[in-house]
Amino acid sequence: MAEFKSSLSGAAPAPQLNAPVAALWWAAKGGWDAAHKLVQDEATADAAWVHAYLHRVEGDLGNAGYWYRRAGKPVATGSLESEWERIAAALLGSGRA
């Protein structure tokens, strides 16, 4: 996680990152559109989870709810920052990055 966070000072995510993790990278940098493009056509539960988070960031809670259901995750109610941390830790800690 520390290495991932330190990479946020760069200009782009590491090329070996999968789409959901790269989308989290862009989201942390304020690149909502770039993040959304990475996950909008991905069919995995991880991508759906990040997609849900992105729509929550956008304020579109109805759309976020749809993507949480697709991801099999409960709708987040905490801060956006804590949700980003939770998703990043889960995806990075699982070896799915």
Image (tube, grey):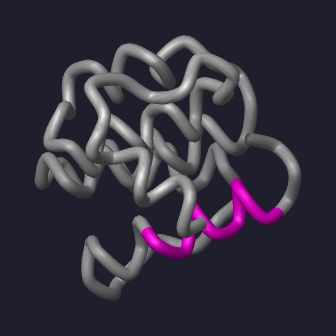
Q: Is residue 8 left or right of residue 14?
A: left
Q: Residue at x 53, y 53 (%)?
A: 4
Helix, strand or loop for the magenta stretch, by majority: helix
**Horizontal arrangement in the rendering, residue 12 relative to residue 11 (left or right):** right
72 or 85, nearer to the observer: 85
Tell me residue 71's x, y (percent): 66, 49
Say above or below: 81 vs 22: below
Q: Is residue 87 magenta?
A: yes
Where is residue 15? Give x, y as percent.
59, 17
Residue 34 to residue 46: above or below: above
**Residue 2 visible in the current orientation:** yes
Quarter location, residue 1: bottom right
Q: Residue 62, percent across and down?
A: 28, 51
Residue 32 percent location from the top left of the image:
20, 33
Which residue: 64% across, 44% down? Answer: 70
Name the quadrant of the C terminus. Answer: top right
Q: Nearer the viewer, residue 76 or 6?
A: 6
Residue at the right extreme, as displayed: 95
Q: Residue at x 35, y 84 (%)?
A: 77
The residue range painted magenta reads: 85-93
* Depth check, front residue: 52 or 84: 84
